[in-house]
Amino acid sequence: MDIIKVLQQELQIGYKQAEAAVALIDEGNTIPFIARYRKEATGALDDQVLRNLDERLRYLRNLEEKKEQVLGSIREQEKLTPELEAQIRAAATMVAVDDLYRPYRPKRRTRAMIAKERGLEPLADLISLQMVKEPVEKLAEAYISQEKEVLTAQDAVNGAKDILAERISDRADYRTYIRRTTMDQGSVCSAARDEKQESVYEMYYHYEETVKRCAGHRVLALNRGEKEKLLTVKLAAPEETVLSYLEKQVIQKDNPYTTPLLREVVADSYERLIAPAIEREIRNDLTEKAEAGAIKVFGKNLEQLLMQPPIAGRVVLGWDPAFRTGCKLAVVDDTGKVLDTTVIYPTAPQNKVEEAKTVLKKLIRKYHISLISVGNGTASRESEQIIVDLLKEIPDQVQYVIVNEAGASVYSASKLATEEFPQFDVGQRSAASIARRLQDPLAELVKIDPKSIGVGQYQHDMNQKNLSEALQGVVEDCVNKVGVDLNTASASLLEYVSGITKTVARNIVAYREENGAFADRKELLKVAKLGPKAFEQCAGFMRITGGKNPLDGTSVHPESYKAATALLERLGCPLDSLSKGGVAGLGKKVTDYKKLAAELEVGEMTLRDIVKELEKPGRDPREEMPRPILRTDVLEMKDLTPGMILKGTVRNVIDFGAFVDIGVHQDGLVHISQMTDRYIKHPMEVVSVGDIVEVKVLNVDLGKKRISLTMKV
């Protein structure tokens, strides 16, 4: 198999692009580094295409390895023919290789094996020739043997039938047809184990849908319902079509003695050996595809959440709401440093509202707080009402934001939080995290296991290794797109930088604490275990503000410093202009990129990137994202009426719609059918996490706490 050619066709990229990307991956380069600094080699393939290529490359290499193992095993058995070898080498999937290997794979003792041990294979061969001129039972009498435990002619016939049934089951071409036909014509069916039991799976109590049309989120819901023992799920196959096909393949002659017997063999082979295996394979395939789709959606949601714009230059009060244990508060300055923490008890059962307001007023005045970040968990609704009342009583201009606090409790109880805030309890750490995730969502959210951030669906039911790898990739891409400040970044943030391991990230922080701030990027080479290769991978993503070389504060890679300096000199721009906000209009001064790139000995794409960066050094790609809605008043669910038009923030996107925060504590659902008038396959074609959208209320169910919204305003 030409793996490069397969990658080229699957990803619809050039052969040379695929070849270069594979070579760069094999050399140990990371995806963010290749995407950003090796555009000439790959033809500017982006990080998403490169990650898909990396994943497929691993699969195809594993497939080739599997083929060699299978060929070796069949060769040892001296059963490898040139035709079989050609079929195995041409197989495009693991399933196809398994099908071809099935007859030669060492099996546990089967009924067919026992029949062969009893000497019944010649009788099976006779039956399969379909040329006998007398009843098979009569021929079977010759195989009766007390010693071999074949006590009657019927025992012999049954053993021969078992051998034939296994032969049919082992035919790769039969399985391929049956699998395809079941996928095309079969249905997924489910029923309740107990119809009287109320559950979230009631829509699946009498459910049937074709395999082809069964959407990923329904596959995952059925799997969970089955796992929780509330549903029974099965695959209804087109049995008549399959049996008719098998009979045509197996019964070549109309023989009165063998035809009825072979019909029985076909039915037994399908029902006992083939159908259960095909059902397992198809359900596994549906689950894998559903999980891959859900992981993709989760990844996109996570990316949008991590790339939300930071709210800079504000002193923020983080508010972790609660009832019995009180609301934990943390005041965080504009650099993320915690200035003060306390606990107030304005909610039930204490209800010390006035006392809490007095504490809040003092904090606002003392620290000039202009923004309150409130977690959306338990007691959020009650806390919001107290904040709104408070804001009406004070002259200060203060706003508040409801923040998704998913994962804050996981972080606050973690070893990392203990190391960061050894003097604080769990609640105080949580309040600090809620404040900081508004100031810089990326820097704060990288401290939390991505699975705990709460922007997915069925994430706990899927392959955790695949999910973790995909989400790690998303976080890595986001961190490297934004870049990190080498002198302020935490170890949690640094470990996602291209080429940096957890150990090296800790070593960078330790070096910084011992030697003070980094003055230039080259100093990274003095960090323990950070060698030349790691430096090459990470340097461009590390930023130093106010260092010796202004280029260290940009995304220009040190390998291009010579070209960048020569470019500035040629165009009459001093290097220190980078420290003053960049060189406006630099791109307009370049008349011929191709010619200039050749003179500066860099690629044309690299030169364009350098020019773009020098015009606005250290630009933050998050600036282009929608900003969170800052509120000063409260709206309750009972205030909502159908037809009301509101602005809201998209909190989560799933296969069948999106959940939108409209400021009433309970997110409303915009079903996929209510997003736009045109046909869409997935909500992500219209919305992303963090988007600010205008919605109209369709329906409010106070009892079930459900809000239906439409974007067709």
Image (cartoon, grey):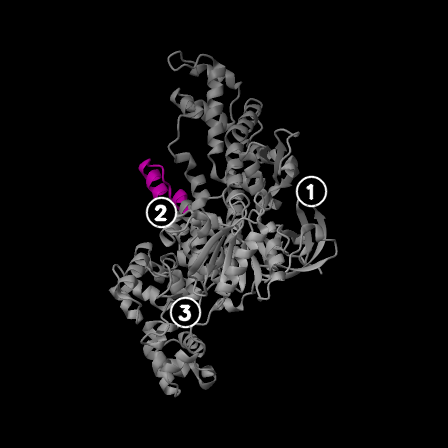
The foreground one among 557 and 333 is: 333
Which is in the foreground here, disc 3 or disc 2?
Answer: 3
Tell me which residue sits at (42%, 24%) in the image: 121
Q: CA distance from mark 1 to mark 3?
A: 56 Å
Which mark identifies residue 65?
Answer: 2
Q: CA distance from mark 3 to mark 2?
A: 31 Å
Residues under numbered marks 3 and 2 in contact, where contact means CB atoms less than 8 Å apart: no
Asked whether residue 55 is in view, the answer is yes
**What secondary structure is found at the residue carrying circle 3?**
helix
Mark 3: which amino acid?
Lys
Q: Earlier in the sequence, mark 3 or mark 2?
A: 3
**What secondary structure is found at the residue carrying circle 1?**
loop
Judge left or right: residue 233 versus residue 150.
Answer: right
**What secondary structure is found at the residue carrying circle 2?**
helix
Q: Main secondary structure of the magenta part?
A: helix
**Image coordinates for residue 535, horizontal then vertical, percent:** 30, 65
Mark 1: which amino acid?
Gly
Q: Earlier in the sequence, mark 1 or mark 3?
A: 3
The foreground one among 465 and 329 is: 329
For the C terminus, the quadrant is: bottom right
Looking at the image, residue 625 lies above or below residue 301:
below
How many numbered marks appear? Answer: 3
The residue pinned by badge 1 equals 703
